Image (cartoon, rainbow, N blue to C red):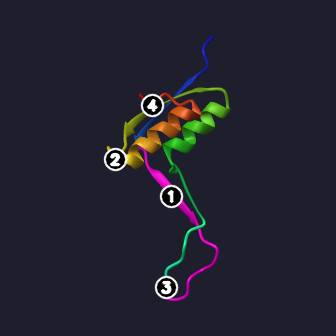
Amino acid sequence: MHAPLVVGLGRIGVAISGLAPNLPSGNATADLAALSTTPAPGISVALRAALRLGCRARAVGTHGADLLGQLARSALRDAGVDAE
């Protein structure tokens, strides 16, 4: 028997988070100590949750043709989501 297939339909985005050693005052700039990118909340998170519950997961939707779009697609694939 196959595990249930969960299909996520929609736009696949990327969340970018930065970690700064301190908060700048006013309009000052701050250096980043770290930068992290992950698939943005939405279908990406739902599909990864489905995988953890034992389901198969497939993403059907759009993502950018740029580097961030490639990053989102790669992250889904690495998590086990069928993103072809």
Q: CA distance from mark 4 to mark 2?
A: 16 Å
Which of the two marks, 4 or 2, is nearer to us in this view?
A: 2
Residue at image position (61%, 19%) is 3
Residue at the spot of label 3: 28
Q: Earlier in the sequence, mark 4 or mark 1?
A: 1
Query: Which type of secondary structure does the marked residue at label 3 adopt?
Result: loop
Residue at the spot of label 2: 66
Q: Residue furthest left?
A: 65
Image coordinates for residue 15, horizontal then vertical, percent:
50, 55
The residue stretch that appears in magenta: 11-26
Check disc 2 and give the amino acid type. Answer: Asp
Q: Earlier in the sequence, mark 1 or mark 2?
A: 1
Check disc 1 and give the amino acid type. Answer: Ile
Q: Earlier in the sequence, mark 3 or mark 1?
A: 1
Q: Is residue 2 above or below residue 78?
A: above
Asked whether, in this view, residue 15 is left or right of residue 4, the answer is: left
Which of the two marks, 3 or 1, is nearer to us in this view?
A: 3
- Is the residue marked by circle 3 packed among few (<14), some (14-19), or many (20+) residues within 10 Å? few
Residue at the spot of label 1: 16
Q: CA distance from mark 1 to mark 2?
A: 15 Å
The dot on residue 83 is 4
Check disc 3 and give the amino acid type. Answer: Ala
Q: Earlier in the sequence, mark 2 or mark 3?
A: 3
